[in-house]
Structures are given as C-alpha cells and as structure tokens.
Amino acid sequence: MKKFIMIIVTFALFFVPLSCVHDDDYQSPIINYPNLTANYTIPQLKAEATETSTLLHKDSIIEGFVVSSDEGGNIYKNLYITTSDGKSGIQLNINQSNIYNYYPAGRKVYVKLKGLYLAKQYDIAQLGGEKYGSSIVGQAEWNLVKNMILLAEDKVNEETLVQHYTNIENAIKNENLATLIELDSVQFQEKYLNKTYYDSDNTSGSYIEDKQGNILNVRVSSYAKFANNILPSGSGRIKGILTKYKSTWQLMLRTIQDVNLDQSRWNKEEEKGDTEGTKENPFTISQAMNNQGQTGKWVKGYIVGSVTGQSIVEGAQFNAPFTTQSNILIAASPNETDYTKCIPVQLPYDATGVNTVRPNLNLATNPVNFKREVMVYGDLTTYFNQAGMKNTSDYVLGKEDNSSNTLPEDGEENSQTTNTLVFPGGDFEDYNAFISSLNSFGIKPYANLSNQTGINNSNSLHLKTDGTSANEYVFTILAQKKLLQQPKKIQFYIKGKSNKTISISLFKTDQISYYAFNLGDVSEDKVITASSNNSYSGIIDTNGQWALITLDISGLSDLNLNQPSNNFFGLKVGKLASYNIFMDEFRIY
C-alpha cells in the first residue's frame, strides 16, 4: 500500500511543473502613454521665474525632452529637459535616485505644473518642492512627481538636442543654462594633467580651455562612477549640461562617454602662430581660429563647401550641387568634411558692385571654385557660432590675383552677369533699391521688409495676410538693364505657410501675355515649369525650413529682359487665403 501511495505521489510531482507551463506566446504589456497637449512652453515658464519661490496654481502643462542622465552618478536628484531644438532648458529637482530608469535621455515628457514650485537660482530656472535649506526650490517627492512628470512615446536622437560650439565664450550665456552643449577643440589645462576627475585636493573641479584662451569649470562629484579616472591629456570634444554656481560657469558631465578628448594636445602659443595675417604672410586656418577678434586679416585655405540655412550643424554642405551664395567654408585640406575644422566666410552683398567677393567666390554659381585654393581678407569674428570671418572684402583665388576688385569697363563682360539679382534689392539688403524697381502700382501693404529673417540671418520679404478679396499682384518688377540675354533659370528661397500657393508671372516682350509659374504644393526644394494661366491650387508648408524654388525658363526666348519701362516679373497670391511666408535671394542664371 505504501509503495502504491509513493508511486502516486511521484507521478503527481512529475506533473507539477508541467501543470504550471502555459504557451510561450508572451506579449509585452501595453503601455498607455498620456493623451496630453502642452499649453505652455519652457521659455514662457522661465520668463516667470524669480529668485522667490512661487507655488504654481494654473492647470498648465509643458513638454520637453530629457537631456540629462544620473546613470554616471555625477548628476544627483535632478532632471534637465529642453525644448525640441535644445535651446531652452529647465531643471527639475526630484527626491529620487536613478531617475534615468524612469526618464531616459532623448525621451519626451509632459510636466503638469500645478502643485510645483518655481524659482530661479544662479540664473537657472527650477521646478520642484518647497524651499529647503539653501535651495530656493526643494526636491519634489517621488510619489508626487511620478504623477506630474509623465513619459511620452516620442523619442529623438540626442544629436537634435545638443548645441555645438568651438568657442567657450559663445557657449556660456544664460539662455544656454540647463541645456546640453558640446564643445570642440578643447582640452584640460596643463596643470590638471595626471589628476583625476574628482580631486580631493581640488574640490572646485578642473578646467578645460579652448584655443582662444577661454576656460570652463568641469564639475565632477566624488560620487561619480568615473571620479577616480585620470583626466585625458588630449584635445577634442566634451559634452555636458551647462550650469552655474554663484558666478562660476560649470559643465556637468553625465557619463564618461561625454568626454572624447582623443586628439593630439595643442600648444596655445604654437596655435596662435607668428604670422601677421598679411597678404604676404597669411594666417592658416588654425591660426585664424586662434586669432579671433582681429580685423583686416588675410587667411589662406581651400574652398570646401558652404552653409545652407541658419545652422552650420545641420546646414554644412560639402558636396555639389551648392545652392548658397552668401558664404563659403574654407579649410586646411581640400578634402575636409568636418565643419568644426572649417572657417565659415561671409560673402557680403554689395549693391554698388564694387565688392565682387560674393559673385566671384560663391559655389552656387562658381562650381569650379570647389576645392580651389583661396586667400580671403576680412574680420576674424564669430560666424555660425564658431570661429569665422565677416566683412570679407578682398580675395585671391588660386594663382590668379583678383584682389584689385575693380569693375569692368562698359562693353566688357562682368562675371557678375552670370549670377545676378532678378531685380535690384532682390536679396532685400537694399530695400530702397527693391522699391524703386517696382511698377507704378507699388507693393501691397501686407508685404514688408523683415530684418534678420532671411538666409543666414540676412533680410527677407515677409508676406503676412489673413486673406485678400481677389487674386492679386503683390508686386510687379520692371525689366532691368544688363540681365542675362539667354537665361536658364530663376531661383529664390521661400519659407513659411499659406492656405493657397503663389503664382509668378514672367512677362513677354509683347507686354500682353506672360508665362505663369504656379508653385503648387511646396514643402521642399522644387522645380517649376511654365503654364499658360495663373493657378493658386496647393499649399505652402516648409516646416520652418528654407525651400529653393527654381523656375525653368530655358527655351523661353521672348521674355522681356531689357525693356526697363515694361513689366518683367510679377508675384501673385490667391484670394481668401492666409499667407505667412518669407522670401529671399531672387536670382537669375
């Protein structure tokens, strides 16, 4: 009997684990992300912050993207979030460790403001709990925070949130506090070599330096996982959250991966060089970077590209075809493709034609200049947030000396005629010249000059209206002398939104008929061919970016190019439609 019972028990035990096994079609739990909409912004909130802690009562919600991480142990009970472009940030004080497990870097979060305290300490806007000790804003308790800071589904690449600089002085400004920045061409000062990231004999931290002699404190806590690592001796890039303690600017490292000082160390005096920046003894690219602030200097390098738009990080272009005429990038090597190793050179527009730097150097209309040696003369100053040159007024291209910058005599071919404005003031740098080129009907009141909103912070023409009662010409330009007689295309840039599109009329020599170029839907660069009638079907939405519009006029032999008393170029909008668009750089080729 006992034997029989034992058999039954053994049999039962054999099947116990099997009875617990279900099918392995396991599905991850569904995460219910919050269905929220932000009705307030980080910049708006920062504008309200004062040095007195304030309890927020409004049912407002902000959104931001996480740029911090406490995984490395250096950031403690703080969360930093910024706007989607990484340019405006705020600090959140939270009584919780390992915050990165809940709010990873790159993830979007919503923050419900009601019940949190807001203040500003050392110019950093902070959200958190009640005032505690020396902190104006204390740490919000976790049981409160987890219901007020909600993780969204959106995630972005960190590169879209980081701000890049090659000059510390340009980076350390109040608007960058609580944001993620990366500094290039920096190194730890020599006196800190062979020291550790955290040095008990120097608890105030180590300093990095740039080639211009600026310095910045690198803040590392004794609790950081890399506190005992030896500081790297090389130069390169370093990334972190920009903060401030009293009047001391600090770079708060997140993890050891933020440090990439893997290039050779440079000597500041050698980098500055002993040349004079003269035509006979020009600065090298490296020397130009290290002599910023000097005016009237020659720099020698190779033309390697240009910058499209307003950001060198996103707009540096090193391959043809090139579309920008207002700048070039020069480097020490003709094969350079790293914008941080380039000098951006501004090519100013001169309505008088005396300064021929822009028409003769830009790559858009002079593609043969690509990778060609050049010397340029101007002022060494910040351009595109890095070491650059502005007010460029002279050049020597290749082995041909063009530095005399003289205009051709009448009857001689002017190189500028291969790249000219469609009408005077067509880049809106000389608005009076533009107005003087209009026919007797002038320009509609909803079209106006807009300063520093054009390509590379130049001027533009801004069209803004809630609607017109009829399809109408915004402006019409008279034909100009010395336009190309066999042009191939007209190009201009456009940015913004509208409920209907734009139509361009190019008048024929008979002054009765014209070619219509209807833009249709515009979201990116586009080539337009001629039509017989104006049409306004389509919308414009360039998502905040400049779109290059090309009108294909090849083969149109009856355009009115040289009868100054007659119409040549007209721009029309559709009726009962809102327009909020910017236009710039109208050129003919």
Image: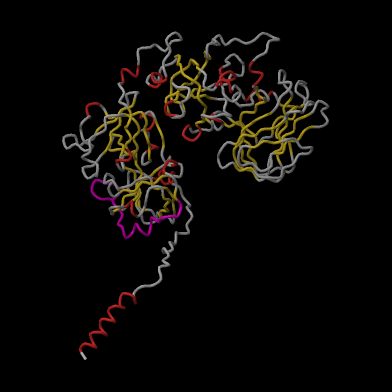
Which of the image's four quarters has the N terminus? bottom left
Vertical side of 233 occupied by 418: above or below: above
Vertical side of 153 occupied by 303: above or below: above
Which of the image's four quarters has the C terminus? top right
Q: Quadrant of residue 354?
A: top right
Q: Quadrant of residue 467?
A: top right
Q: Is residue 132 magenta?
A: yes
Task: State the residue at coordinates (16%, 35%).
Answer: 201
Q: How far across and how far down the image is residue 307, in percent? A: 51, 29
Q: As drawn, which residue projects farthest toward the bottom? A: 1
Task: State the residue at coordinates (71%, 18%).
Answer: 482
Task: State the residue at coordinates (20%, 31%).
Answer: 194
Colour scheme shown: secondary structure
Q: As drawn, which residue projects farthest toward the front? A: 3
Residue 59 left/right relative to 207: right
As rendered, which of 515 and 339 lies closer to the eye?
Answer: 339
Vertical side of 48 occupied by 237: above or below: above
Q: How far across and how far down the image is residue 139, in percent? A: 29, 52
Q: Is residue 135 magenta?
A: yes
Vertical side of 152 occupied by 413: above or below: above
Q: How far across and how far down the image is residue 513, in percent? A: 82, 32
Q: How far across and how far down the image is residue 280, in percent? A: 44, 8
Highlighted range, magenta: 130-154
As rendered, which of 384 and 15 lies closer to the eye?
Answer: 15
Q: Quadrant of residue 163?
A: top left
Residue 228 left/right relative to 57: left
Task: State the residue at coordinates (46%, 26%).
Answer: 336
